[in-house]
Amino acid sequence: MPRIHFHQQLLTLKDKLLAMAALSQQALSLALEAYLTGDLSLCDHVAVIEAAINAAESDVDEFAYDLLAKEQPMAIDLRFILAVIKINGDLERIGDQAANIAQRTKTLSQVPLIELPIDIPDMGEKVGVMIRRAVQSLLEADARMAEEVLAMDDEVDTINRTIAADMVDIMQSQPGISEQALNAIIVSRNLERSADHATNIAEDVIFWVRGSDVRHKYSLAGAE
């Protein structure tokens, strides 16, 4: 009976984390929509969701640490709880990135909304796919799916660098829209950081499922 109760607690912990993941994804999606449309009311929704994310982070951490202290889990159960604690932090930071984008949107409300020659919607879609797949890999304990997320990160990094370079060129050639271009760089960077957090989540899923730490493997591969 004690082990059955423990595994029920693990399922509860996973449910709490998945609920938080849904909030983080919603916050980022709404923030990006606000930026693209200039709808400031969506920024208020993001602020409410971010507050809920912060509360959920504390709840998940407390639940996880309580399990570690009371149950003293071993092997894969221990790796799962440790992975949850780390994933929890990355989901909270995705919420932070969403809040940053919402703040950029409020700043831009003071200047004309213009169309820039960059594809932020495409970048946002790619980041959204990364987050969804990372969370799905957690739900299904699927290390192969998590590896797909790692492979997508380079593409987002490339888009971010391209946007930054293009916006610098625009600021030099069209100083009248420098503020819009600068904010585009910042939003792109927020999306790129969200992709990094999705990558971290995927790495933690692989650690949980396989017991292998792939963080340094991929960082070294990227340096070669």
Image: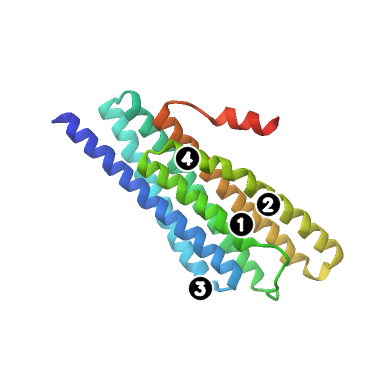
Q: What residue would you read off at disc 1?
A: 123
Tags 2 and 3 touching, CB below 8 Å: no
Depth-wise, is mark 4 or mark 3 nearer the camera? 4
Q: What residue would you read off at disc 2?
A: 160
As measured in the structure, the alpha-carbon distance from the residue carrying label 2 to the one carrying label 4 is 22 Å
Tags 1 and 3 touching, CB below 8 Å: no
First in sequence, mark 2 or 3: give its number. Answer: 3
Q: Secondary structure at mark 3?
A: helix
Q: Secondary structure at mark 2?
A: helix
For the residue pair 7 and 217, the one nearer the viewer reads as: 217
Q: Is residue 19 above or below residue 178?
A: above
As measured in the structure, the alpha-carbon distance from the residue carrying label 1 to the one carrying label 2 is 8 Å
What numbered label is drawn on residue 146? 4
Q: Identify which amino acid the numbered label 2 is placed on.
A: Asn
**Residue neighbourhood size for the residue with mark 4, other residues' Cα within 10 Å, grouped as few (<14), some (14–19), many (≥20):** many
What numbered label is drawn on residue 41? 3
Depth-wise, is mark 1 or mark 3 nearer the camera? 1
Q: Identify which amino acid the numbered label 3 is placed on.
A: Ser
Q: Secondary structure at mark 1?
A: helix
Q: Position of residue 137 (x, y in %)?
A: 42, 43
Q: Which scheme is used to colour this image of the protein?
A: rainbow
Q: Identify which amino acid the numbered label 4 is placed on.
A: Ala
Tags 1 and 2 touching, CB below 8 Å: yes
